[in-house]
Image (cartoon, rainbow, N blue to C red):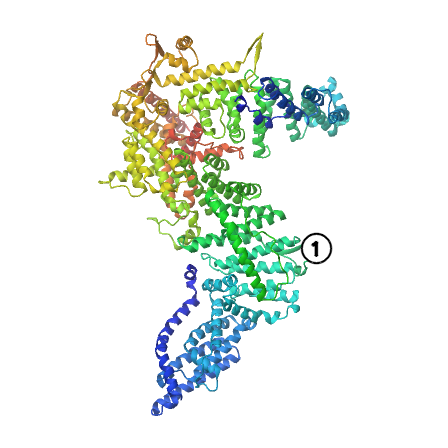
Amino acid sequence: MASRFWTQGDSETEEEESDYDEEEESVAVETTTATAASRYYSGNASDSDDSDGQKRVVRRVKDKRFDEMSATVDQMKNAMKINDWVSLQESFEKINKQLGKVMRVTESDKPPNLYIKALVMLEDFLNQALANKEAKKKMSSSNAKALNSMKQKLKKNNKLYEDMINQCREKPDLFEEKVEDEQEPEDEDEDEDEDDDFDEDPATLESEESEDEEEAGKEAGESGPGWEKMLSKKDKMMDKQFKDPSQITWDTVNKKFKEVMAARGKKGTGRIELVEQLTFLTRVAKTPAQKLEILFSVVSAQFDVNPSLSGHMPINVWKQCVQNLLKILDILTQYPNIVVDDMVEPDENETQKGADHSGTIRIWGNLVAFLERVDVEYFKSLQVIDPHTREYVERLKDEPMFVVLAQNVQEYLERVGDYKGASKVALKRVELIYYKPQEVYDAMRKLAEQEIGETEESGEENRAVEESRGPPAFVATPELVPRKPTFPENSRTLMDILVSLIYKYGDERTKARAMLCDIYHHAILDEFSTSRDLLLMSHLQDSIQHMDISTQILFNRAMAQLGLCAFRVGLVVEGHSCLSELYSAGRVKELLAQGVSQSRYHEKTPEQERLERRRQMPYHMHINLELLEAVHLTCAMLLEVPNMAANAHDAKRKIISKTFRRLLEVSERQTFTGPPENVRDHVMAATRALRQGDYEKAFAVIKSLDVWKLLRNKDNVLEMLKAKIKEEALRTYLFTYSPSYDSLSLDHLSKMFDLSDAQTHSIVSKMMINEELHASWDQPTQCIVFHDVEHTRLQALAFQLTEKLTILAETNERAIESRIGGGGLEGLPLRRKDGQDYAAAAASGGGGRWQEFSFSQGRQGSSGGRMGYNVGGRSSASGLVGGFSRDRQARSGGYQGSRNQDGPGRISGTRGTQMDASTRMVNLNRGIRA
Amino acid sequence: MASKYDLTQRIAPQLDRHLVFPLLEFLQERGLYPEEDLLKAKIELLNNTNMVDYAMDIHKSLYRSDDVPTEMVERRAEVVGRLKALEEAAAPLITFLQNPNAVQELRADKQYNLQMLNDRYQIGPDQIEALYQYAKFQFECGNYSGAADYLYQYRALCTNNERNLSALWGKLAAEILMQNWDIALEELNRLKEIIDSKSFSSPLNQVQSRIWLMHWSLFIFFNHDNGRTQIIDLFNQDKYLNAIQTNAPHLLRYLATAFIVNKRRRPQFKEFIKVIQQEQYSYEDPITEFLACLYVNYDFDGAHKKMKECEEVILNDPFLGKRVEEGNFTSIPLRDEFLENARLFIFETYCRIHQRIDMSVLAEKLNLNYEEAERWIVNLIRTSKLEAKIDSKTGTILMEPNHANVYEQLIDHTKALSGRTYKLVSQLLEHAQAQVTR
């Protein structure tokens, strides 16, 4: 019942609360004396004040008090006559104070008759006033407010004197007489109380209402009293006008409808009540068009039930809302001549045209907007509900309901020819499926088939009850639209259908989102290349910065999923480049909207926090962060360990993963290393083993991670991982120990790392070709012969020096170039390749600072910055946007370069050199600025 | 097995109907598919063209009877009738064009020409349009040379861009079918310019046109003398490579072959290997696999195996397996070249990572016997393509290690620096002087 807490800010409830405190004490007193009082009664029938004869002085005081009280009662009577609730309220407070005095004076524990009579009178008047909605509406706002608070107070107050009030009602004249308890009026009171509650606070209503409305329908027989009473009340207000079905005309309904609508949004109009009234009206509507019009209002009134942005609509209201929308669709299907439109203001009497009217009837309404709102409410409710409760699961089961609705709306829109709207609806459907792997999808399909069957039954009962309780609806709508979602066997098929519709008709944002969902879904199904191609072809990396935050989050999610997918299919480099950006800022949770991360340096304003909370993903859509981290670090380890071994001399030069290096440093600084506990520890332990070339231990440590069981084809992945670890272990071993060997036999190596000869041969050959390893094969003896070209420390340093000199020279050149203008330097052999690293470093430093500075933009910036995705890709446009791909690519390439330049060797772009070239160009500019 | 790598089904949809015939002929020749199926396919193709006579012939040979279905006969009559009508419609313009004196009056200015035709010969847009229709009809009838002429003339008079484009396509097809490779190449380049120009309608359309263009160009490139270089120039362009990757990965086979056969394209070749590596999931074929084995996995046995498969593929490919007959001696030049180069590739890579190689192993890897291998290697050494020596006592080849001296490298690195700095300083001085004098 989180919602209760949300709305606690209401002034009214607080007031009530404090009231309650005051009252509580007296309740305690009363209850202790209650039994005494009754004994007192039976023993001494005469009134207490009468029996008190001795104290004269006191009596005078007592009389005085009584006079005061009766004066107040007179005041109240006057106020009632003119229906002035404000003064009535004042008098009521006064009389309560006086009561205290009187009681003290009389030293009795029983309130005087006068007071009880006043209470009875007040109560009657209040009920009368409440029943008369018309009058209530006409009240001034202060008056209405007073009425409401009066209602509250009186209720609380009267509880204390229940018995006596009952007695008084029974026999007003002989009040003193002992009467048997009559339960009925009291019952009524309580009912009124309940109703009052409804009017007052929609949030608390959720539970009670659900019992009354929905459950009443479900357990048709048993729960009688609850809703019957409600009904009686409704009848009270409605049936006044609609007593006789035969007298109802279109006009009366229309008038009432206008009246009800006019009250909407005004103070003192209960939101739930409004819905009820409108629902009643739908039953008496004369023409289908009118029914439709009213139904639309019902739905929007239902949306109004929850006023706050962060809270969600009560679930039962949500369900009704879905049902109502389905009803709308029924009508629209039944009468195809009715057109729903939100552009034109329809004629005043458009709805008068009956069912037999052949021309088009225009009704105001927007199905797509409604559907989107329903979706938003569903999403919000999932955000708010604690994911570890049963409630959450129950809520998840409502999904098929929404799917049905969406499906029907989409079909309707397609039938009408509104493909734009249909594509929006299709997107909503896509957003429900895209994160589901096939298993979950199947489960949902099964659930939908069962569940809907059940609800259909109960739904019918519900209907039956509904019909029996009021006058039968004039416009009966048969269920035309299917109430059961149809799912294709395969989630991919469904995605394809929906997505292609969206690509055809959707607007930019819809298309981009659909594309991201598509990418995500492909990635889940282990189709890495397809989803990568989609990502690159759509150029989303370039434009994502300019999109709204929710889409950026979706982009981040897609990237994370893509990274996981790459890892699963064994593409370590790609996996790493997908994930490294995500981890570079250390705000994974925030980027994926899976929880709020605390930042040490930035206090968030409450506003920001609230916004962030509103963006959170519901729990069932989360990507497991631990798995993500494990994958990221494992990839980083596989790349970084041999890389570090290869560049033992200048470790700082080529850094593939800064995050990983940092972690490694931290773990190396520890004096004692305990057994690994979390993911990081595990990976660090594995790293230590791998650096020694101990692949078995490394694999064992990695394997012992629990998170792997979240992978679907765990065994295959681990197998792949083992192979990769072996390979990297071999490479690391060769890098580290080659200076100590003159020759090494293939046999020996293969045995050491448990690889086949061919594999070893291939790995070593690759290293030779790439000139990572200065060695060659001696074919007749199957040996690797190492050439002694390893530079000495001095030589290596000399090389570094020359490189730095080159950079210096280049900086000079650039400085002059900018000073005296370009040209003139073309003839010089610019060696910009070396300069590039420098410029990149400078630029990336700048980038980092920028990220820290603009925090509110930081999210945007960082997620936008995540373009650095250099899966060996056709990073230029393949296809759809073939025309101007070149310069765009240059931009993205440059950006990428500035962010995580891993040294030229590691860029595995198809168009490696071109990318390099463009990177250089962009970096140059940046360098100048920096 | 041979038909597994047959690309006809993937290529045909991107070609003009008429261009498919040569492919089918080739297949018929190779006998990969049952003859009947091919003939049926041909009739199917011809159904939508106007070459009814040809269709009749095929029908006869397919069913071994002289009966021809009545619909064909009817169609023939219809075609002839339509031909007459079109001819009449286009007659004024054609007579004008056939008159050399009149043609001389035409100038480079299109507007002027149209005006002139309209004023003096009463030839308006209708007649010009008729010329186009007539040319198209001629093409469909199989009269390619006529169609090519008319289309050429039509293009000189046409003002409609779209029409111009389709006329160009028609001209290209006609030239290809007439095997005028030089002219076809010109047309190809003209078309390419238009496609690449920015004014082209939609990107999707553009990609599609590029794919068509590449498919059509296969005819030209594998027949033209200079084609193997040009195919790389065309296909390896960014935009075209993207199109290949997106929609027609099977074209990678031709590009790969061209790269293997063409020795001078080394820098692009490395890039291309990456493309192949990346496209492995969408397209595989012995030729690309061969490259992958050799340059991605360094699996020489695999490469060796693939080489044999490649031969098969080349023989069965209508573009690659072109036969040249000299006297009574048939050769497939591309196959020989391919094998030679592939062998060289293997050997080169192999040598790069070895210090000592056993001759017999090498001979086996190169698909040669010992003697041949030795001769081949000696030749390489003599032409100083290979720095190695043969140790004939042990039967091995010894590679000479070629590592640059560390100090040489250092000097290299720094040498340029002083030059650059010197130039820089002089430039600075110049600038300073210039400012002083100003």
Classify residue A104 by image quadrant: bottom left
Q: How many marks?
A: 1
Q: Residue at x 36, y 49 (%)?
A: A597
Residue identified by numbered label 1: A358
Image x and y of residue A636, in percent: 35, 36
Classify residue B332 by image quadrant: top right
Image x and y of residue B418, in percent: 33, 22
- Give the quadrant of the C terminus of chain A: top left
Classify residue A808 by image quadrant: top left
- Crowd rating for badge 1 (residues with CA inside 10 Å; few <14, some 14–19, many 20+): few
Residue B150 in view in this figure: no
* Chain at tag 1: A
* On screen, residue A256 above or below A564: below
* On screen, residue A448 above or below A161: above
Outermost residue to the left: A671
- Give the quadrant of the N terminus of chain A: bottom left
Q: Is residue A711 left or right of residue A239?
A: left
Amino acid at the residue labelled 1:
Ser
Image x and y of residue B291, in percent: 45, 22
Image x and y of residue A139, in percent: 53, 72
Q: Which of the pair B354/A334 is nearer the observer? A: A334
Q: Secondary structure at mark 1?
A: loop
